[in-house]
Amino acid sequence: MKRKSGLSKFNGFLAIVLVICVVVTAFVINKYPKIEDASAADGSNTQDVAVIDEFKAGTYGGKEFKTQEDVVNYYKECYDYTKTLTAEYKTDSGETHSYYKMLGTETLDVNNLLVEGKSNDIINKLVPGIVGGLFKGGTNGLSPSGNRDPKGDTRDDGKMDCTKSLLEPDDILAANVKDNGDGTITMTIQPKETILSMPGKDPQGRFFNSLGDISSVVNSISVLSFSQGTVDDNFVVDYKGGTGVFVIDTKTNEITKADYTMLVHIDVKHANVTVLKDKSASLDITYKCQYPASDDYLAGKNIGLTRVK
C-alpha cells in the first residue's frame, strides 16, 4: 500500500505557493507602498553552524561513546532494529495489515515569505490557509521513509531502501547524547547543510524526507520563466539547521520516541510571472515528523488506521 503523505505532493504545492507569493505580494507591494523591508537575515548567506550542544565522550545508559562517529553508528543500529518491528493495524474498511510499529505524524509550515525582500500581513495570513488546504499529513516509518509498510518502504522510485539507515558518520555536523537516568538516552543529531537535497544522496537526504528535485517541478510551470539564467541558476533550495532528537532504550536498542525537524530556505531570483518581470522571492519551510503518532492522529480521515491491541 502506498503511503498517504502530504510530502508526496509537496513539490507541486510548493511551486504553486511560490507563484502566488510572487504575484500577490508584488501586487500588494505596488498598491501599498508602506510595506517595510524584512528585518530577517537571508538564511542562504549564513554559515552552517551547530545549533545543538557539542559531543562529550562518556558512558550514557550503559553505552560507551568515545567519538561522534560512535553516536552515528549507534543511531544506525537502533534505527535498523526499530524498523524491523511491526504491529497490526485495522483500516476503516475492516482489513488488518502489518505495518511499522513506529508510525509518525507529518506537519509542515511555510513562513518568512518575502518578495523583493519585503513582506506584509496580507501574504502572511493568506499562505497558512493555502498550506492547510493543500498539505494533508500522512503517516510513515522512521525518516527517511516512503511507506508505512516495510515491504514497500522505498523512495526515489524504488532506488532508495528505507528499511535501513544510509546515514554516514561524515554526514553529521554535530551530535550529542544525554543519560535520562531511567535506562534510556536522548540522542540529538544535526546533519550537514545541503543545497538541493536528493533522497539518499547526501547528508540531508540520508537523514530526512528531503524534497528531492524541486527545480524540475518549477521548470515545468508554464507561467513562470526567468529574465536571465536558468532555473538552476535562480532557484536555490538550502537545507540547514535541522535536527533529529531520539529517545532510545539502551537495553533493547529500540527508538521509543523520535522528532525530526527539517529546515529549508528557498530563494528564487529573476522570476517572471505573467506581467511581473524580474522578481525575487524567498520562503522558509519547517517540516516535522514526530513518532509515535497518537491513536487519534492515525484514526483521522486522512489515514484511517486503528492499532490492534
Image (spheres, rainbow, N blue to C red):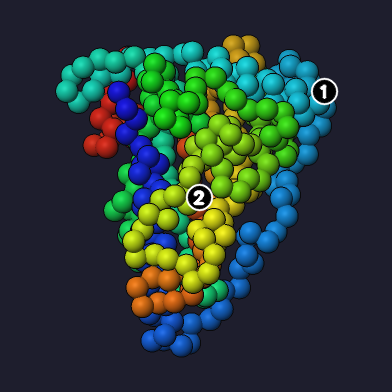
What residue would you read off at disc 1?
Answer: 66
Q: Quadrant of residue 242?
A: top right
Residue kind at label 1, given as amino acid type:
Lys
Q: Position of residue 9 (x, y in %)?
A: 35, 44
Circle 1: element type: loop
Q: Quadrant of residue 251?
A: top right
Q: Position of residue 295 (x, y in %)?
A: 34, 29
What residue would you read off at disc 2?
Answer: 286
Q: Position of residue 197 (x, y in %)?
A: 56, 43
Residue closest to the eye, 14 or 84? 14
Residue 238 lies, with reference to residue 63, above or below; the image says below
Left or right: 184 as drawn, with respect to 267: right
Left or right: 300 as drawn, with respect to 146: left
Residue closest to the eye, 226 or 96? 226
Residue closest to the eye, 112 or 57? 112
Residue closest to the eye, 74 or 229? 229
Q: Give the quarter of the figure containing the N terminus.
A: top left
The residue lying at 77 percent from left, 29 percent from top is 68
Left or right: 85 as drawn, with respect to 68: left
Q: Is residue 244 visible?
A: no
Q: CA distance from mark 2 to mark 1?
A: 32 Å
The residue lying at 38 percent from left, 60 percent from top is 17
Residue kind at label 2, given as amino acid type:
Thr
Q: Residue 80, which numbered label?
A: none
Q: Give the quarter of the figure containing the C terminus.
A: top left
The residue lying at 56 percent from left, 36 percent from top is 205
